[in-house]
Image (tube, rainbow, N blue to C red):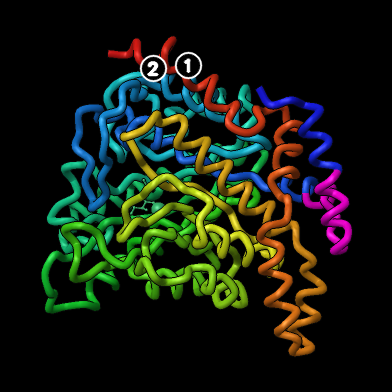
Amino acid sequence: MVKEKEVQQAYEVAKSRYAELGVDTEQAIHRLQTVSLSINCWQGDDVSGFLNPNGELTGGIGVSGHYPGKARTPDELTADLHEGLSLIPGTHKVQLHTIYAVADHKKELNEVGPDDFKYWVDWAKQEGVGLDMNPTFFSHPMVKHNFTLASPDEAVRRYWIEVGKRSREIANYFGESLGQQAINNFWIPDGFKDNPIDKVDPRRRLLNSLDEIFTKKFDEKNTIESVEGKLFGTGIESYTVGSHLFYNNYAISRHKLWTIDVGHWHPTEDVSDKFSSFLLFGKGLMLHVSRPVRWDSDHVVIMDDALMRITRTLVRDNELARTNIGLDFFDATINRISGWVVSARATQKALLQAMLAPIDDLKKAELNFDFTQRLAETEELKSYPFGAVWDEFCLRNNVPVGLDWLKPIRKYEQEVLFKRS
Ligand code: RNT
Ligand code: ZN
């Protein structure tokens, strides 16, 4: 067990070390407290959902691993989320998908509505979390030839347009009932494995489908849509209808948010460099923080350079208020709850480390072309005792400090997860 007194002593030392640089650790702690992450419910059940429990995961995304204890029912998933959330400091949101509807009888994706999400709203109220939404456009027989909203087949398109419309009703219900804006994130898997002849018509169809879905006006206090593009998917290597440029332009012209999924770019591309280029014109961003190992592999998030570049950019550019930080990964080789905890805590730690910097001074040095100061100070800051501030943050939030969070998870897997057959 980490000793409370030692944590506090270390914090006092860290506080004065940072103060020497003019950095106020208390301010950073308060600032971090205001950042809520949107936790991806689908890590708890390998993106299965409840509407089609035996269905295969399609759309170019895949989960590896068979760790025991996957959630199979709404009660199991919410219990697991509760366990995870209790180990993550702060107040957060949970991202759902159409497939997580809790319906009283078997329903199609284009039949579910707000009533089928009452279960989640009641749970969210009890848990003190917000909810975000994602219409599900994959893992379903109506995805024909890898096409949904951009399909040339009218019946297919109509089916998915209805799914999109209903997701907005559901997101609006989340916002209305919970008193905080629900982000409704649209991602579709549409594309071609091999070289297409026509590159414009599929995009024209997607544009028209989205415009139709978004015709109805909802109060933005309750919900706003975000659109997520992609470079490619497995089986859709040659052409992705919903490309980054398509959605970038769509978001700007329709006053929607743009989703940047870290895995949806070339692994060597620095996504943080895109934020300011978009935000100078756009309304706001949604992030799908993920870890693409060599490709869009959806690994659990860790505190690596890519994550640090993201959090530093958001903090230094002062864009946290216009950026919704969602998590998006699926890993079944480990305890699934630990995936949530590791990813969320890594993201928060990376945010805190970014906040613990004399940003105004560094900007001044840059404006004065003092690149020596900029380089020396940013490099030195990396070994400042930010971990002691993080521990204090956990302590104040009544969540385990350091590796202590793993003990309750081990207990929970013995008592709950391993008993699920
Ligand atoms: C897929 C997208 C999408 C999904 C989730 C489950 O490549 O990243 O966001 O991961 O909707
Ligand atoms: Zn994503």
**Which dot marks residue 412?**
1
* Residue 413, x across and y down, in percent: 42, 17
Residue 278 to residue 127: above or below: below
Q: What element carries label 1?
A: helix
Which residue appears at 21% of the width and 70% of the height? 239
Which residue appears at 47% of the width and 23% of the height? 80
14 part of magenta stretch:
yes
**Callout 1 amino acid:** Tyr
Q: Mark 2 points at which residue?
A: 417
Which residue appears at 84% of the width and 59% of the height? 23
Relative side of 189 to 304, left or right: left
Relative side of 102 to 377, left or right: left
Please say whether residue 321 is visible from this viewpoint. Answer: no
The kind of secondary structure the magenta stretch mainly shows is: helix
Give the number of marks: 2
Which residue appears at 47% of the width and 16% of the height? 412
* Residue 397, x across and y down, in percent: 73, 32
User: Which quarter of the picture shows residue 9?
Assistant: top right
Under 8 Å from ligand 1: the CB of mark 2?
Answer: no
Distance in Å between CA atoms under marks 1 and 2:
7 Å
Q: Could you tell me which quadrant the C terminus lies in?
A: top left
Q: What's drawn in magenta, residue-wise?
A: 13-28
In this view, the residue in front, 366 or 228, is 366
Crowdedness of circle 1 by 10 Å Cα count: few (<14), some, many (20+)? some
